[in-house]
Image (cartoon, rainbow, N blue to C red):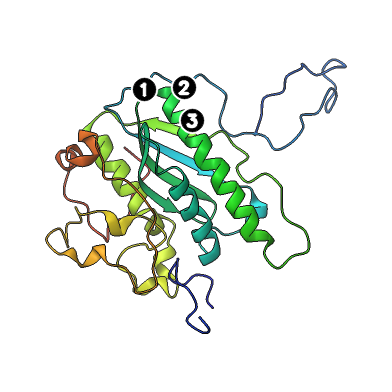
């Protein structure tokens, strides 16, 4: 089975952290207490107040030992995590894309506490299922860290920002040039994302076929947006989003 084939497909045969203490020994290089564990790239600042009207773009990175996330078994593990948090009333994943080393999520939360709790639940579930998937066929179960960093969160407050975030998440595979490799070269949308659930594509806004994946495809479980910005406001932030658009890092 090809690792980079359509995610969710089933075989048909038979069936970085701040240093807590100042260095010792003056200015001598290398002196002092060494931090333990991987360093977090996201500083531990207090999260801003979150209004329920404003969705959030979250970036979540994984440790190198996990390997490429764009594989069928890792896709399934992350999909299980979307099922785990789907029952929450105060936290919703609206869109998600899986890249090789990180995840992009567009989420809605009632407040800052709901965002923190929802992301914690998603990370715990994803880590559990990823470790189980990575351990399959091996004598010992993997129990190491999966997400080393504090996730990066950007609150979305305008139609222009919402449009950029939507395009950035759903078309992120083109930014990373995944669309140039086989078999993904032939894909219209990224099956390692929730792009199939987005009804606003410029080319196919009136066609329902994008809502149906390949026969063996299990889509990521995401919610319909409730915030105006993700439901309709993004469309006032620029031209309709094309399936061929390559996102930029500028906003």
Which sits earlier in the primary sequence, circle 3 or circle 2? 2
Which sits earlier in the primary sequence, circle 3 or circle 1? 1
Residue 68: name its quadrant. bottom right
Q: Is residue 87 above or below residue 207?
A: above
Q: Residue furthest bottom?
A: 13
Q: Which residue is mark 1?
A: 50
Q: Are marks 3 and 2 in contact (CB under 8 Å)?
A: no
Which is in the foreground here, disc 3 or disc 1?
3
Name the residue located 80 percent from the left edge and 28 percent from the top edge: 34
Where residue 26 appears, as percent x and y from the top left, is 84, 15
Q: Which residue is mark 3?
A: 117
Q: Which mark is residue 197?
A: none
Where residue 99 appears, as percent x and y from the top left, is 48, 55
Work out how far the residue at label 3 is from the one at label 1, CA to CA, in angstroms: 13 Å
Compared across the picture, whether 143 is left or right of 45 comes to right
Front one among 116 and 61 = 116
Q: Are marks 1 and 2 in contact (CB under 8 Å)?
A: yes
Name the residue located 44 percent from the left edge and 42 percent from the top edge: 85
Q: Which residue is mark 2?
A: 47
Front one among 233 and 214 = 214
Q: Residues within 10 Å of mark 2 (few under 14, many from 20)?
A: few
Work out how far the residue at label 1 is from the one at label 2, CA to CA, in angstroms: 8 Å
Q: Is residue 228 above or below residue 132?
A: above
Residue 160: name its quadrant. top left
| Quarter in which the C terminus is drawn | top left
């Amino acid at each position: 089975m090809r690792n980079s084939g359509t995610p969710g497909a089933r075989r048909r045969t038979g069936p970085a952290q701040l240093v807590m203490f100042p260095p010792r020994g003056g200015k001598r290089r290398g002196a002092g207490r060494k931090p333990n564990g991987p360093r977090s790239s996201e500083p531990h600042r207090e999260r801003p107040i979150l209004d329920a009207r404003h969705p959030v773009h979250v970036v979540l990175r994984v440790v190198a030992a996990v390997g490429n996330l764009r594989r069928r078994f890792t896709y399934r593990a992350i999909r299980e995590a979307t099922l785990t948090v789907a029952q929450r009333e105060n936290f919703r994943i609206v869109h998600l894309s899986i890249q090789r080393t990180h995840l992009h999520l567009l989420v809605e939360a009632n407040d800052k506490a709901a965002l923190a709790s929802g992301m914690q639940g998603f990370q715990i579930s994803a880590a559990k299922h990823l470790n189980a998937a990575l351990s399959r066929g091996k004598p010992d179960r993997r129990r190491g860290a999966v997400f080393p960093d504090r996730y990066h969160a950007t609150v979305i407050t305008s139609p222009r920002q919402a449009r950029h975030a939507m395009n950035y998440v759903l078309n992120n595979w083109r930014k990373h040039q995944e669309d140039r490799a086989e078999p993904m070269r032939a894909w219209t949308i990224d099956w390692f994302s929730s792009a199939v659930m987005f009804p606003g594509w410029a080319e196919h806004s009136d066609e329902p076929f994008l809502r149906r994946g390949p026969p063996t495809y299990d889509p990521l479980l995401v919610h319909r947006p409730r915030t105006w910005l993700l439901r309709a406001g993004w469309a006032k932030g620029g031209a309709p989003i094309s399936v061929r658009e390559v996102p930029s890092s500028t906003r």
